[in-house]
């Protein structure tokens, strides 16, 4: 018998896995047709275009539509909500904002890295996952510094993917 009421968590998981499957198949199709360099270029272009729309939608869903993100507290509210909206529990991701104007992140395992590794292009992959977060910040007009600066895939290059954003407000 079918359960008439589906939990928010179950809906999120189905939608997120569907989106990620589409993303992976799109990446694979581009890779087969165009090669890794052009695929990286198109991937980042699509992420940047999507992120500006996605950010507006998330701000609206969080009741922050029209707000200027001009404080660390507002940014914390955004990232807490964004994590719940688009980063499912099954992703092995840690995010902390317990130090003023600092967001620390770590991917313990990374779905994108695992995928590009299976495709044999991890050494040439340009990370789209953290680029998406950078695009969110850019879309909100938040000034930041990211350490390390990512040019490639940290999991492949360093064996781990972690770092931080330092934010600059009011100046």
Image (tube, rainbow, N blue to C red):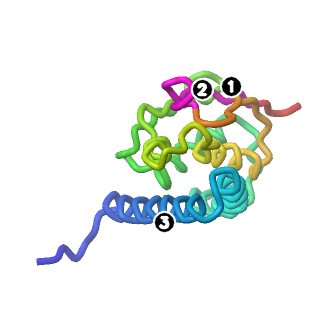
Q: Residue at x 65, y 56 (%)?
A: 39
Q: Is any part of residue 65 visible from this angle?
A: no
Q: Is residue 107 visible?
A: yes
Dot 1 falls on a residue whose secondary structure is strand
Mark 3 or mark 2: whose residue is earlier in sequence: 3
Task: Specify whether 99 is left or right of 2.
Answer: right
Specify the segment rendered in magenta.
Answer: 154-167
Percent position of residue 80, x then y: 52, 43
Residues marked 3 and 2 touching at CB (< 8 Å):
no
Residue 164 inside the magenta-drawn segment:
yes
User: Mark 1 touching mark 2, by CB under 8 A?
Assistant: yes
* Quarter of the figure with residue 114: top left
Residue pointed to by mark 3: 22
Q: Hey, which quadrant is residue 7 in on the image? A: bottom left
- Residue 161 belongs to the span the image colors magenta: yes
Helix, strand or loop for disc 2 = strand
- At label 3, counting other C-alpha atoms closer than 10 Å, the crowd grade (few under 14, some 14-19, many 20 or more) is few
Q: Residues within 10 Å of mark 1 (few under 14, many from 20)?
A: few
Q: CA distance from mark 3 to mark 2?
A: 28 Å
Q: Residue at x 49, y 44 (%)?
A: 120
Tag of residue 123: none
Mark-to-mark CA distance, 1 and 3: 30 Å
Residue neighbourhood size for the residue with mark 2, other residues' Cα within 10 Å, grouped as few (<14), some (14–19), many (≥20): some
Residue position for label 2: 163
* Residue 147 marker: 1
Q: Earlier in the sequence, mark 1 or mark 3?
A: 3
Q: Residue furthest left?
A: 1
**Nearer the N terminus, badge 1 or badge 2?**
1
Q: Residue at x 61, y 47 (%)?
A: 128
- Indicate the quadrant containing the N terminus: top left, top right, bottom left or bottom right: bottom left
Q: Position of residue 91 (x, y in %)?
A: 40, 44
């Amino acid at each position: 018998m079918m359960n008439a009421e589906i939990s928010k968590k179950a809906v999120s998981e189905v939608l997120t896995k569907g989106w990620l499957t589409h993303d992976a198949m799109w990446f694979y199709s581009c890779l087969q047709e165009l090669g890794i360099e052009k695929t990286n270029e198109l991937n980042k272009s699509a992420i940047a275009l999507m992120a500006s729309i996605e950010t507006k939608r998330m701000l609206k869903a969080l009741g922050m539509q029209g707000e200027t993100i001009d404080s660390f507290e507002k940014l914390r509210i955004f990232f807490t909500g964004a994590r719940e909206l688009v980063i499912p529990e099954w992703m092995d991701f840690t995010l902390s904002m317990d130090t003023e104007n600092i967001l620390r992140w770590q991917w313990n395992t990374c779905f994108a890295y695992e995928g590009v590794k299976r495709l044999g292009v991890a050494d040439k992959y340009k990370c789209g996952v953290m680029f998406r977060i950078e695009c969110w910040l850019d879309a909100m007009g938040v000034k930041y510094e990211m350490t390390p600066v990512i040019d490639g895939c940290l999991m492949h290059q360093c064996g781990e993917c972690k770092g931080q954003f330092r934010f600059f407000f009011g100046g």
